Amino acid sequence: MADRILVFYGSYRSDRQGIRLARYLVRALQERGAAAELIDAKQVGLPILDRMYKEYPEGEAPGNLEQLAVKIREADGFLFVTGEYNWGMQPGLKNLTDHFLEEWYWRPAAIASYSAGRFSGVRAANAWHGTLSEMGMVVISSALAVGGIGQALDADANPVGDGGAALNRAFPRFADDLVWWIEAARNQRARMPPPY
Ligand SMILES: Cc1cc2nc3c(=O)[nH]c(=O)nc-3n(C[C@H](O)[C@H](O)[C@H](O)COP(=O)(O)O)c2cc1C
C-alpha cells in the first residue's frame, strides 16, 4: 500500500507564497508513489482553539475537525511546510496542530521551511522541531529550506531559477529519509503496539 503522507500548510494570507512549495511537495511525493494529500489550514478553517478534538464527546466534534482527525490517525507520516513570521511560526498552522494530540503519535514528521529572504524560515523550523516532538512525532533530521520563495517556484508550483534547481536537488534525499522512517515506524507498530 502507498505511504499516506499528509502535507500541512498554514498561511492565511491572500497573497501567500508558500502554497507553491506545499503543492510542489505534494506532487513530488505523489510522483514517488506516495498517497500525499495537502492539508491547507486556511481551507480546513478551524477557529482559534476552543476545544481540542478529544474534548468533544464522541461523535459531537465539528465535521471539519472529525474529518481531519480521521486523516491524521490513518496517516503514515507528516510533512510540515512552515513559513516564518517574525522569527516564529505561522499561527494558522500552529492553531490547527494544537487541536490534536494523541492523533499524531508514533509517526515521523519532516519539516520544509521557506521564507522570502535567504534564511529560508529556519528559525520557524527550529520552533516546529520541538513542538512536533512534544506532540509525539519523530522529527527526521533531514530538512528542506527554501529561500527566496517568491522566485523559486512559479504560480503552477514548478521550480524555477537557481532556487528551484536547488529545491529539485535537495528533495530526493529529504523524501528518502522521510519514507525510511515511515517504513521503520510502520514495522515497529506492527511488531509491538505503542506503549500508550
Ligand atoms: C507578518 C510577517 C512576518 C514575517 N517575518 C519574517 C521573518 O521573521 N523572517 C523571514 O525570513 N521572513 C519573514 N516574513 C516574510 C515571509 O517569509 C514571506 O512573506 C513569506 O512569503 C510568508 O509566507 P506565506 O506567503 O506563505 O504567507 C514575514 C512576513 C509576514 C507577513
Image (cartoon, rainbow, N blue to C red):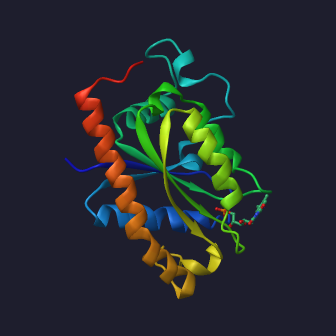
x and y percent of residue 190 in the render? 23, 30
Q: Residue furthest left?
A: 1
Q: Residue at x 56, y 38 (%)?
A: 133
Q: How many marks?
A: 0
Q: Is residue 11 visible?
A: no
Q: Is residue 77 above or below residue 154?
A: above
x and y percent of residue 94 in the render? 64, 42
Q: Residue at x 29, y 56 (%)?
A: 34
Q: In this rendered view, identify the residue nearer to me: 31 or 124.
A: 124
x and y percent of residue 171 in the render? 43, 69
Q: Residue furthest right?
A: 86
Instruction: Using residue 135 as the reference point, say whether residue 84 is left or right of it.
Output: right
Q: In this rendered view, identify the residue nearer to me: 170 or 102.
A: 170
Q: Residue at x 31, y 61 (%)?
A: 30
Q: In this rendered view, identify the residue nearer to me: 74 or 12.
A: 74
Q: Residue at x 60, y 51 (%)?
A: 10
Q: Is residue 124 above or below residue 159?
A: above
Q: Is residue 16 visible?
A: yes
Q: In this rendered view, identify the residue nearer to me: 180 or 132.
A: 180
Q: Residue furthest bottom?
A: 161
Q: Quadrant of the C terminus?
A: top left
x and y percent of residue 107 in the render? 40, 38
Quarter of the rendered structure image containing ligand 1 = bottom right
Q: Is residue 99 above or below residue 5?
A: above
